[in-house]
Amino acid sequence: MAHNTFPGLGGRVVIVSGAGGGGIGTAVTRMLAEAGSTVIAVSRSKDNLAANVEPLAAEGLPVIAVVADAATDAGITTVLAHARQTPGELYGLVNVAGGAAPATWMPATRVTRTDWRALFTQNLETMFFMSQAVAAELTTRGLPGSIVSISSISGMNTAPFHIAYGTAKAALVAATRTLAVELAQHDIRVNAVAPGVTETPASRAYVGADPERDRRAIAMGRRGQPREQASAVAFLLSELAGYITGQTLLVDGGLNLKWTHLGADHTSLFLEDDGFRAAITH
């Protein structure tokens, strides 16, 4: 059932790019649908959509699963075609698509052009060209709108042994600020959320459970949950943030306030696998 926690989202169409992973994107999809938006939930993985998004629709939530790759023009065209066919007024875009596999961690001296370009495509180009397409659609139709993208604490601070990912997420913040200026005249707001360490299926690939480490590293003493990142996204997307644009909201439980999660070898204390640590620093 829709509720009014996030005013201005009811009855509107919102695209969530990167909705199928079972983490932040899926949590955003649920929260926006519960707020009354019709959510076009996009993932390049049909299996992920079947596992994590289609059950939301089965609950009766207004969610439309769309298989499309946000890193390609064809994928973006597919998403916009669905947006035009969906009843309701197009209003929002949430860019979650991105991330980085464990194999992308390595010293800066070992990063290849292929590594660099792949992470920039995955984390920056997906955000920019999807935003560009949605903004063009909104301005052509004379509609107001709101765009929120997922950056990372790695884009707000240093990212040792993960330089390409951190730099791409920092570039996303810069793109957010410039888009906000250009699109303000069209009544389109553009913001970002920078999560700290969040407990998601993707993060479990290299961050195990360790309550004592979490208490040591994070001011609030625990890792974040996807729904907590989703709440920040929904806030920025909604009319509650009607006079906010060009900002990046750091949602990290105070991790940045206790920037002590780097060990003596400058690797993250969250990397509990000594074999993985040795491999990325070699």
Image: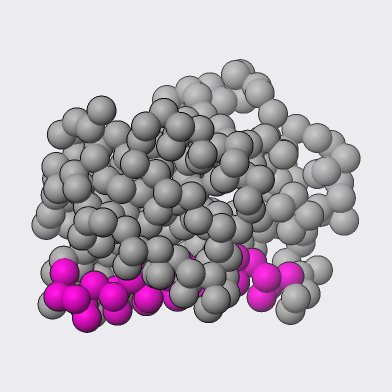
Residue 256, quarter of picture: top left
In the figure, residue 48 lies in which quadrant?
top right
Q: Is residue 161 above or below residue 26?
A: below
Viewer-proximal residue, 85 or 264?
A: 85
Position of 197 with respect to 163 (left or right) is left
Q: For the point 16% across and 66% down, which residue is it?
A: 144
| Outermost residue, top side | 212
Q: Is residue 126 magenta?
A: yes
Please give left or right for residue 41 compared with residue 114 in the image. Answer: left
Quarter of the figure that contains the C terminus: bottom right
Q: Nearer the viewer, residue 176 or 214?
A: 176
The residue lying toward the viewer, choosing from 128 and 71, is: 71
- Residue placed at 32% from the left, 67% from the top? 84
What is the quadrant of the N terminus in the image?
top left
Residue 65 shows in this picture: yes
Is residue 71 within the magenta segment?
A: no
- The one nearer the camera, 141 or 146, is 141
Residue 253: x and y, percent? 41, 33
Residues in magenta, as a range:
115-143
Give the total of numbered labels: 0
Left or right of 28 on screen, residue 152: right
Image quadrant assignment for residue 44? bottom right
Residue 263, x across and y down, in percent: 68, 39
Q: Residue at x 50, y 62 (%)?
A: 169
Magenta residues, dominant SS class: helix
* Residue 243, x across and y down, in percent: 11, 57
